[in-house]
Amino acid sequence: MAKKQKKSAKTPSAPLPLSDLLRLPHGPVDLSTLDPRATPGFPGKDKSDAPAATEVIGPELSELQERLYAAGRAAEAGAPSVLLVLQGMDTSGKGGVIRHAIGLVDPQGVKIKAFKAPTADERAHPFLWRITRELPPPGMIGIFDRSQYEDVLVVRVNELVAKSVWSARYRTINNWEAKLAAKGTVIIKCFLHISAEEQKARLLARLDDPSKYWKYNPGDVDERAKWPAYTEAYEAALEKGNTEVAPWYVVPSDRKWYRNWAVAQLLLEHLRALALGWPPADFDVAVERKRVAAS
Amino acid sequence: MAKKQKKSAKTPSAPLPLSDLLRLPHGPVDLSTLDPRATPGFPGKDKSDAPAATEVIGPELSELQERLYAAGRAAEAGAPSVLLVLQGMDTSGKGGVIRHAIGLVDPQGVKIKAFKAPTADERAHPFLWRITRELPPPGMIGIFDRSQYEDVLVVRVNELVAKSVWSARYRTINNWEAKLAAKGTVIIKCFLHISAEEQKARLLARLDDPSKYWKYNPGDVDERAKWPAYTEAYEAALEKGNTEVAPWYVVPSDRKWYRNWAVAQLLLEHLRALALGWPPADFDVAVERKRVAAS
């Protein structure tokens, strides 16, 4: 494939690949040891540098996304796809990441799905049925706002199914993700890690601003009361789901500006690793040039 | 509803509403009298002012889109939606508009559908069946890259059905759009108007740049040979589809920078006209504040 760049890539790299810095090590997970206010790899001093740092990602991210899309158009079944999974407590910023990080690329190349509580129809099927239907086609970037992991998170915490059922799901998810990766889907799983104090501040902020009332749900306070149980469930999901082909990234998310930059940067690094060129012409360029000129 | 603005709206208005300037007058349409290189209403001198003009639209467009989305979340069936229909000859820039104009808003609030040649299954249904399924839900902005009008354009030009069939479709489309508008969908139909010379230049540009080969389709030259027949079909579709509730806008599109700005501005003006506030709280704010504070 042609390697010619459409625009020169001027993006300076983060000191280390962020994928290395945020990748969860294998083994037991203790979230209390991971600082939600940390800013690893950020190429600047503080919040004031965030707009510039994110802006610098934009052009390269945009071009790499276009190459992926072009590959999908040219080769369909053979082209890769990307799946970005966003998980995190309420107010951790899944929506904010989509707005600010995914908003950097062409919306035509993105397929976004927010998973809510399953419908009666969905519950009548195996839990991965509704997830599989929303996977990105070749050439596309799929974004999951919540995901297959809800079936071992909210389901486990609220005992919506028997322990024997949810405890078997970790392996089911591992196998499903392994098959997906083998078929050419790059899986990027991000846990947006916030502190209980930050969640409280964000809930109060929604109540202080009439333009944010619509984001507030009284039920969120009931879920907040189960913070320790959710933490335990997340630690299990992160540990058991942390495979070679589909590792977890823990994104410190108490600082929104870091979180948005970090997810954009993770996406950029994974797209770079695909090393996609532009699809070659499947027609005779000289012949076509004459046809157009004569038209 | 609360009218408080989240951010102050600093966007200077175009001299006249662009909706007035680009709205197609009623009556017979002669595209040869409409200049595809014109730049009506553009608040600047030339291309060099386009990035700033488009940037200035961004924040207000983004906030109005969020209000629409919030209305959809709060009131579902009762909330309005927006449908942006993009039509135009090959290379007129339907994809470019989505990338640059629609790229200004939160991708979570946008539902994009590109209509290709209908499948066997779709052809077994009335022609509006597949269109209806892709309409935006309340609170969403739907983008149609090609639309119901293909059934009186490519179908008419290539005689894919009998004249008696396609000629009845104008009225069917009018009635369908009228019902849609009555149910609360704001319909913005844009014809991206390019010249035959500009199309030739854009096709040649795709053949001169290996990063654009994937956009080139030899079949486009065959369609280009039918330019007069397409012009006639477009003139009929524009005239007959130009109703009060779903008027056509003719967007001069030989200059890409004008085209992208103009569609963003049209979308902005239609969202402004909805005059949406933020949904009121459906809970007791004081009670919830205490609950969160105690949590």
Image (tube, coloured by chain):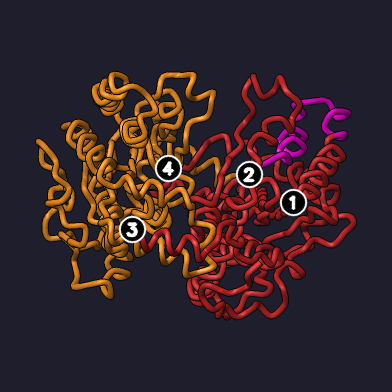
Chain colours: A orange, B red
Instruction: Tell me the distance, in whole angstroms, between the alpha carbons under discs 2 and 3.
Output: 30 Å
Residue at (59, 74) in percent of width and height: B4
Which label sits on residue B1?
none
Amino acid, disc 4: Tyr
Left or right for A13, reference B248: left
Q: Chain of mark 2?
A: B
Chain where mark 1 sits: B
- Magenta residues (range): B143-168
Q: Percent x, y for residue B113?
A: 58, 41
* Nearest to viewer (mark 2 / mark 3): 3
Badge 4 or badge 1: first in the primary sequence:
1
- The residue that label 4 is drawn on is B213
The crowding category of the residue bearing disc 3, from other C-alpha atoms within 10 Å (few below 14, some 14 to 19, many at least 20), is some
Residue B137 tag number: 2
Q: Residue at x 77, y 37 (%)?
A: B152
Q: Quadrant of residue B191?
A: bottom right
User: Is residue A143 among what the camera can see?
Assistant: no
Q: Nearer the viewer, residue B226 or A89?
A: A89
The amino acid type, in three-letter code, at marker 1 is Gly
Q: Chain of mark 4?
A: B
For label 1, the SS is loop
Q: Counting other residues with Cα less than 10 Å from the Cα at mark 1, is it few (<14), some (14-19), or many (20 or more)? A: some
The answer to whether residue A141 is above or below residue B42 is above
Q: Distance from label 1 to label 2 (Cα)?
A: 10 Å
Amino acid type, residue under disc 2 in the picture: Pro
Q: Which residue is mark 1?
A: B184
Q: Name the quarter where the N terminus of chain B is drawn.
A: bottom right
Q: Label 2 vs label 4: CA separation?
A: 36 Å
Q: Residues within 10 Å of mark 2 (few under 14, many from 20)?
A: many
On residue A199, which mark appears? Answer: 3
| Image coordinates for residue A75, horizontal then vertical, percent | 39, 30
A204 in the magenta segment = no
